[in-house]
Image (cartoon, grey):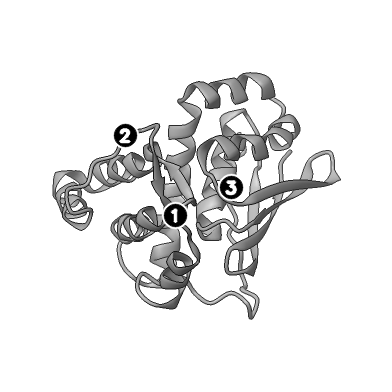
């Protein structure tokens, strides 16, 4: 059996500075967010679950300290500006450090966690049911799925072949490795084989994802 693979966006274009735990990349994303840019609490709770699963009790306690004791309700909306620093802190723990490659690994893992959390909801289960085992149908429905989870951004799909498309995200606050993890996980969840997802960042909050499967 062929194992599905996730291919990240390398090499980088000049417009793509490396991701950083501290510094311009995170700070700029937070600065561009408004009070109406929100995500569901289940994604915040998913950070705790991911850390606990991979780092155990000690890692979870460290992350709780970074979160300053905050608690979240799955279906309440929370500012993305609050989620971002928590996601970076979780990614550092999951990836094993602050180096760019470690951070990208951690953020990509969080994208997979977020997909599992979303697909477990009533909306996610409906999306799976409607898509069946058809990745093309899933990709055509995915933009509407995002709208139920976050308040910001626009997403669209352009088809190159029946098994290859470009999924464009505009004004999305999460970095491209996160959504590489999301898109890979959602397509493999419906049985996609040899799934490849490559993000090409075209702006700080804008990315085009080349996606294919067999």
Residue 200 in sight from this viewpoint: yes
Q: Earlier in the sequence, mark 3 or mark 2?
A: 3
Residue 35, image x and y in percent? Answer: 44, 54
Q: Is residue 61 above or below residue 125?
A: below
In the picture of the structure, the residue carrying the numbered disc 1 is: 35
Residue 132 in sight from this viewpoint: no
Using the rendered view, name the quadrant where residue 186 is placed.
top right
Identify the residue at image location x=43%, y=33%. Answer: 117
Q: Earlier in the sequence, mark 3 or mark 1?
A: 3
- Can you tell which of label 3 and label 2 is closer to the viewer? 2
Residues under labels 3 and 1: Cα distance? Answer: 37 Å
- Can you tell which of label 2 and label 1 is closer to the viewer? 1
Identify the residue at image location x=52%, y=48%. Answer: 181
Instruction: Classify mark 3: helix, strand or loop.
Output: loop
Q: Is residue 49 above or below residue 35?
A: above
Instruction: Classify mark 1: helix, strand or loop.
Output: loop
Q: Residues within 10 Å of mark 1 (few under 14, many from 20)?
A: few
In the picture of the structure, the residue carrying the numbered disc 3 is: 5
Identify the residue at image location x=65%, y=34%. Answer: 192
Q: Nearer the viewer, residue 193 or 140?
A: 140
Instruction: Classify mark 2: helix, strand or loop.
Output: loop
The image's mark for residue 70 is none
In the picture of the structure, the residue carrying the numbered disc 2 is: 73
């Amino acid at each position: 059996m062929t194992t599905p693979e996730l291919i990240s966006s390398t090499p980088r274009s000049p417009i793509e500075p490396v991701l950083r735990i501290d510094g311009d990349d995170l700070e700029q994303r937070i600065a561009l967010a408004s009070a109406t840019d929100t995500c569901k609490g289940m994604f915040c709770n998913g950070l705790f679950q991911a850390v606990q699963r991979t780092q155990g009790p000690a890692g979870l306690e460290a992350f709780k300290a970074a979160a300053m004791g905050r608690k979240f309700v799955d279906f309440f909306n929370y500012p993305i500006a609050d989620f971002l620093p928590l996601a970076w802190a979780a990614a550092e723990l999951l990836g094993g450090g602050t180096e760019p490659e470690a951070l990208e690994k951690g953020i990509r893992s969080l994208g997979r966690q977020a997909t599992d959390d979303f697909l477990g909801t009533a909306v996610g289960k409906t999306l799976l049911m409607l898509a069946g085992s058809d990745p093309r149908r899933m990709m055509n429905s995915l933009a509407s799925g995002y709208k139920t989870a976050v308040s910001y951004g626009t997403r669209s799909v352009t088809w190159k072949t029946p098994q290859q498309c470009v999924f464009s995200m505009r004004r999305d606050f999460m970095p491209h490795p996160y959504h590489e993890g999301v898109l890979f996980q959602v397509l493999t969840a419906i049985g996609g084989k040899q799934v490849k997802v490559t993000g090409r960042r075209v702006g700080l909050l804008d990315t085009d994802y080349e996606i294919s499967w067999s």
